[in-house]
Image (cartoon, rainbow, N blue to C red):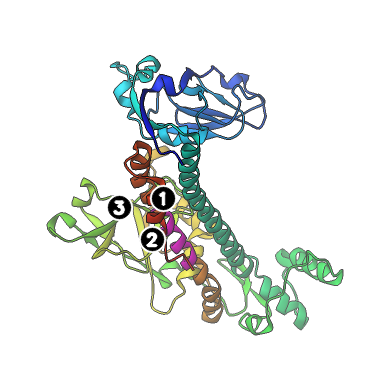
């Protein structure tokens, strides 16, 4: 394979062109992505540019680069690659991610990338499209693995949340036990019970699966009415969240502990498949909350939107978090997995909403002390423990996938400029990734 690289001007490597106007009032329902300077921003019935294509910001957000396999509509705040000049489109995508676009922006109050200036930039690129294709595939495989990890984590989260709802919201195991024992079903649950019974009687392939008998024995076989929560399984009580988990707002000031390494959790743009972000910046010098190794973090911001995180073990001396979190630590013997999904449940999320102070928007904050005494259902410990045994391995798998994705992103960001400048050859990069990922997530 030819590894020769050439120094040429960017305009000889590709041609960039300004995107096209498309006001919201003119957009029609369709399947073609509309791409702005900050990324995909909706869909339209028509694609203005044939895919595959590459887009970057011209005004607004500068420096981000986007790839579209299908036809798309680049907005007028963007530049798109009109002519790849025979080069591999996905390689061009990764290559443009290494450019410092701000060097070629106008010195105006609202800076914008000057396409003509950008075309004059001197760049180093591989002459062979086979080399370009190999580099693009290598980098794309890293990104696809990260995407797959995210999809797996989302599936695991949905499965665990569905199990929580079935056991502790819809009370399916209790309904099944009551039906088997011939006990009455409360009116609010009668329709669900009748549906389950009918599906089993019909032998439907879509009939809900019954739990193993040994698991169902952990659940009651009848219901009683609770004045706080309505109809609940016999023996299950209404209680406070604080009976299961302690709100731990112990303050710590990392700035007064020089030389000590802290893992710092800060509120990210929410993605339930990811962990709170790590930030080693100046903010860790100010007062924070300590984070217990078994903590569950709940955001005070954007209340009612299930912004809840499962803390994973860190390799620092201690962990701290932004004071925009509410750290809850399970009490001894309580199921961490149960408490995590309880915090995400409608019951607690509504309590979080009811605790809000401040006006609309960014000033709204949930009040931790009010959330801590939210009314919750307290099942028997055996049922919570069984739930934990099902779900904890899923959470462990999610943590491993997240850690692998973080490592892959760091590897990609380290290797990307070296690969695309010719400093590092593809076989060397592949060997480095194999060595770094010798141990796959279980």
Up the image or down, 242 lies above or below 136; here it is below
Q: Crowdedness of circle 3 by 10 Å Cα count: few (<14), some, many (20+)?
A: many
Q: Quadrant of residue 390?
A: bottom right
Task: Tell which tag, 1 or 3, sits nearer the viewer.
Answer: 1
Provide the residue span drawn in magenta.
396-406
In the picture of the structure, the residue carrying the numbered disc 2 is 435
**Cα gap from disc 2 to disc 3, whole angstroms:** 35 Å
In the picture of the structure, the residue carrying the numbered disc 3 is 322
Give the residue at the far front of this rendering: 2
1 or 176, which lies in front?
1
Dot 1 falls on a residue whose secondary structure is helix
Q: Crowdedness of circle 2 by 10 Å Cα count: few (<14), some, many (20+)?
A: few
Q: Which of marks 2 and 3 is nearer the N terminus?
A: 3
In the picture of the structure, the residue carrying the numbered disc 1 is 427
Dot 3 falls on a residue whose secondary structure is loop
Is 402 covered by the magenta stretch?
Answer: yes
Specify whether residue 304 is in view. Answer: no
Up the image or down, 276 lies above or below 209; here it is above
329 or 320, which lies in front?
320
**Cα gap from disc 1 to disc 3, whole angstroms:** 42 Å
From the viewer's perspective, tell me whether residue 127 is left or right of residue 254. Answer: right
Residue drawn at the location 42% of the way across and 72% of the way down = 243
Residue drawn at the location 43% of the way across and 66% of the way down = 439
Q: Earlier in the sequence, mark 1 or mark 3?
A: 3
Q: Residue 330 carries which label?
A: none
From the viewer's perspective, tell me whether residue 108 is left or right of residue 150. Answer: left
| Percent x, y of residue 320 | 27, 59
């Amino acid at each position: 394979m030819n590894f020769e690289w050439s120094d040429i001007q960017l305009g000889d490597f590709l041609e960039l062109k300004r995107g096209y106007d498309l006001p919201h009032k003119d957009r029609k329902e369709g399947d073609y992505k509309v791409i702005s300077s900050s990324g995909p921003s909706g869909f339209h019935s028509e694609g203005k540019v044939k895919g595959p294509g590459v887009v970057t910001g011209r005004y607004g957000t500068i420096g981000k680069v986007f790839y579209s396999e299908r036809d798309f509509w680049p907005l007028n705040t963007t530049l798109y690659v009109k002519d790849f000049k025979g080069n591999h489109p996905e390689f061009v995508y990764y290559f443009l991610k290494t450019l410092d676009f701000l060097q070629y922006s106008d010195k105006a109050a609202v800076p914008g990338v000057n396409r003509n200036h950008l075309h004059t930039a001197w760049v180093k690129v591989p002459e062979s499209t086979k080399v370009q294709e190999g580099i693009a595939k290598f980098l794309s495989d890293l990104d696809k693995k990260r995407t797959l990890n995210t999809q797996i984590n989302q599936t695991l989260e949905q499965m665990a949340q569905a199990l929580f709802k079935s056991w502790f919201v819809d009370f399916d195991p209790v309904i099944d036990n009551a039906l088997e024992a011939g006990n009455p079903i409360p009116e609010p649950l009668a329709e669900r019970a009748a549906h389950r019974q009918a599906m089993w009687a019909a032998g439907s392939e879509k009939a809900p699966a019954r739990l193993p008998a040994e698991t169902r024995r952990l659940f009651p076989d009848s219901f009683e009415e609770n004045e706080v929560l309505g109809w609940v399984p016999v023996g299950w009580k209404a209680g406070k969240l604080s009976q299961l988990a302690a709100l731990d707002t112990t303050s710590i000031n990392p700035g007064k502990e020089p030389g000590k390494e802290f893992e710092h959790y800060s509120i990210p743009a929410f993605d339930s498949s990811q962990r709170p972000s790590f930030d080693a910046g100046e903010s860790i010098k100010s007062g924070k909350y300590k984070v217990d190794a078994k903590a569950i973090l709940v955001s005070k911001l954007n209340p009612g939107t299930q912004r809840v995180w499962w803390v994973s073990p860190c390799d620092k001396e201690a962990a701290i978090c932004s004071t925009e979190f509410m750290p809850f630590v399970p009490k001894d013997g309580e199921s961490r997995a149960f408490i995590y999904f309880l915090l995400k449940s409608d019951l607690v999320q509504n309590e979080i909403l009811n605790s809000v102070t401040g006006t609309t928007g960014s000033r709204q904050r949930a009040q931790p002390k009010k959330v801590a005494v939210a009314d919750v259902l307290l099942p028997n410990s055996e049922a919570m423990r069984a739930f934990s045994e099902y779900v904890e391995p899923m959470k462990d798998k999610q943590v491993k996938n997240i850690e692998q994705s973080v490592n892959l992103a760091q590897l990609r960001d380290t290797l990307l400029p070296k690969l695309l400048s010719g400093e590092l050859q593809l076989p060397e990069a592949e060997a480095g990734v194999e060595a770094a990922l010798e141990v796959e997530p279980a």
